[in-house]
Amino acid sequence: MQQISRQEALDYHEGKRPGKLKIVPTKPMSTQRDLALAYSPGVGEPVEEIARDPSLAYRYTAKGNLVGVISNGSAILGLGNRGGLASKPVMEGKAVLFKRFADIDVFDLELATQDADEVINLIVNVAPTFGGINLEDVKAPECFYIEEILRKELDIPVFHDDQHGTAIISGAGLLNALEVVDKQLDEVSIVINGAGASGLACAEFFISLGAQQDNIVLCDTRGVIYEGRTEGMNIYKKRYASRTSKRSLREAVNGADVFIGLSAKGAMDVTMVRSMARDPIIFAMANPDPEIDYDLAKSARTDTVIMGTGRSDYPNMVNNVLGFPFIFRGALDVHASAINMEMKIAAARALADLTKEDVPDSVLAAYGLTSLVMGPEYVLPKPLDPRVLMWVAPAVARAAMESGVARRMLDMDDYLNELTERLGKTEQVMRFMQIKATRDPKRLVFAEGNHPSIVRAAHSIEQAGIAKALLLGNQDHVHELCERLKLDFEPEVLNPADSPELDEYIQVLYEARRRKGITLTMAHEMILQENYFGCMMVRTGYADAFISGLTYNYPDVLRPALQVVGVMEDREVVSGVYLMIVNDQLYFFSDATVNINPGVEELASIAINAADVAARFDVEPRIAMISYSNFGSTRGVESDHMRAAAELVKERRPDLTIDGEMQADIAVEPDLMAQLYPFSEVSDANVLIFPSLSAANASYKLVNRLGGADKIGPILVGLRRPVHVLESGAEVRDIVNMATVAVVESQALDADDEGLASRMFNLWPIF
């Protein structure tokens, strides 16, 4: 990461609008009636309801999604005691992290007092505003006292992140690091350097995870905290005083398995690293510079050194952002009265478990990496991993319910759906489709089975219960990939040349294509190609769908699909549909991949194909035939084709709502349509049919790039059985999405033909 200059940081915080936060209303505010509902007299009703039952504040106000981030600035990270007002940029930063990672709203409060009792009194009196309190940058030992009293006084979660966040994240990393070096938590010796809020919290948390207190040595600037020491002690340090003759950090580290640094730059040196036990674990978390330089510590020994820091430019960043947004998310969603040890342990174990999962391509790209598997350089998830929300928040919520601090009980399947919505409409849509897919999983065959992305996607598909994956490739190579990627997965791998069905497939293709220029020898050569072999597996019913295209050109997959699988009887063409998600609205763009200049018959089929796709996403299609003309305003061959195609669709499928020709802005603006063309049968169209491949292709790409829309596709539709062509270089997430679409499509086709399609291949014409 490039260095950030002082002026750059100041300019960022100033900008056109100073600060990093603003308040945005969540209800309509456009009419006088809206304002009357929002304030007077509308507010009177919820006021009376909350006065009658205070728990209804979670129902009628933002309390349930609102956290107070509160500081007196007495221990600003790396800067010391600068006072409450100076801490405001930090607290605003904390607020945007809450919003960015867990969709939690924050009011930040900076207190102009250093008196612990005043801090407590102020927080107690503002607490009804919030669903939880996040204490930040409050110095020790006052922070322990403040949190302890607030936990007793308040019935909402109180969480001092400098203590517990650091403990939870480092605890998760420690669990995985010990697994990597094959050591047991209840046997290792741990040295914690730094006896402030974070150090004491780490000691407490590690013991809760299973470490033995007798194996933990705590040090401060005066050395080891031992029984009988009086200088620089307080009641909190006394709890962790050791029975030991060691008096210095250097002595304590000698022979230790684990070093936890929460102190200052230079606290550790190479000699100390070399004195530690085999395969030492060093979490040097001082900021901005660790207790010992990363490269120095790694090069000090020849065995494994697992090194973690608080910095993003080194592996194993111990970052509290992995914890507090998601811990509060789970706590808020069950209306928890506290964040207890059970919830903190659940968060740590969820993070540790997530680290063992295959890492999404988006995360690898964000960090400029090609792969990540759990090992010395990866014992914690990356902070930008979007899956943390889906792992940590449910674990925390479940622990809250099981430990008795939840006041709202959740159905966990419904809760996962709720969390998915917070990740965005695309994730919500695909989770809905995955749920449909898991109700009747299918057999999917993949070309390019030797490719790591295909193997990873197949693993994800089977893990999620979406489908059984069949890979075309080399069995030994695929199994080696699984081992290297640490995937607990034994896929079914098929080599076309070794298949017992090879002769049958050759004969079927030859019989179907012998009057179209194909000899028996040519049929043999074609079937050995993955795209022909995979399509034949679908045609003969051995697989339900075929997916290819990661490294092939689009025609290389489409041609075998048309020749082997064939077009549906009631369609003129196969076409490609992109699902575009724009401002949480779903639109289906077609044909963006196959037909260059379709005629009237082809356009009608393209429209019906796109409507079928919309229906599989449980969207009622409203089809607009897009042109430069509105209902005959400008006559021309293209506009005439679009109008004629709309009429043809009405004849073939009277159940569909379709109109046109019309311009694109009219199609998607219902108010404009009602004003100018009130007679139209379509208002607020969601299926947009373009007159040519170039128009559709340019439109979806511009909406994606300039409008920031998400896309799913291309979804190939109109074939007798599902075959889908991946975009070249597609990410694992895209492959899984396409597989999900293929399964749902196969389910729909089975329902349409009572499951006969995959078994009646001899009746299919091959084009």
Image (cartoon, rainbow, N blue to C red):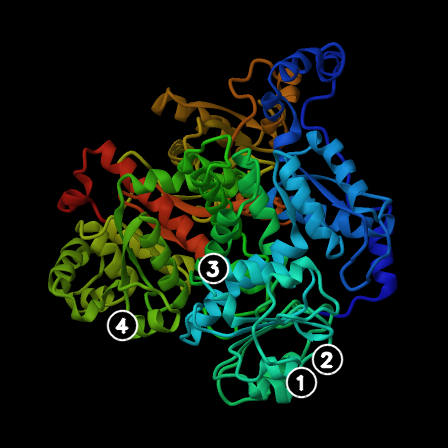
Give residue 269's mark: 1
* CB-based contact (under 8 Å), mark 2 and mark 1: yes
Q: Tell me the residue that label 3 is attached to.
A: 209
Name which residue type carries label 3: Leu
| 496 sits left or right of 297 in the view | left
Whole-Å distance between the Cαs marked 4 and 1?
Answer: 49 Å
The residue at the point 21 percent across, 67 percent down is: 496
Name which residue type carries label 1: Asp
The residue at the point 52 percent across, 49 percent down is: 341
Task: Spot the residue most to the front.
Answer: 228
| Residue 610 in picture, x, y percent from top left | 42, 36
Name which residue type carries label 4: Asn
Whole-Å distance between the Cαs marked 3 and 2?
Answer: 29 Å
Residue 721 versus residue 266: which sits nearer the camera? 266
Give residue 266's mark: 2
Mark with earlier residue (2, 4): 2
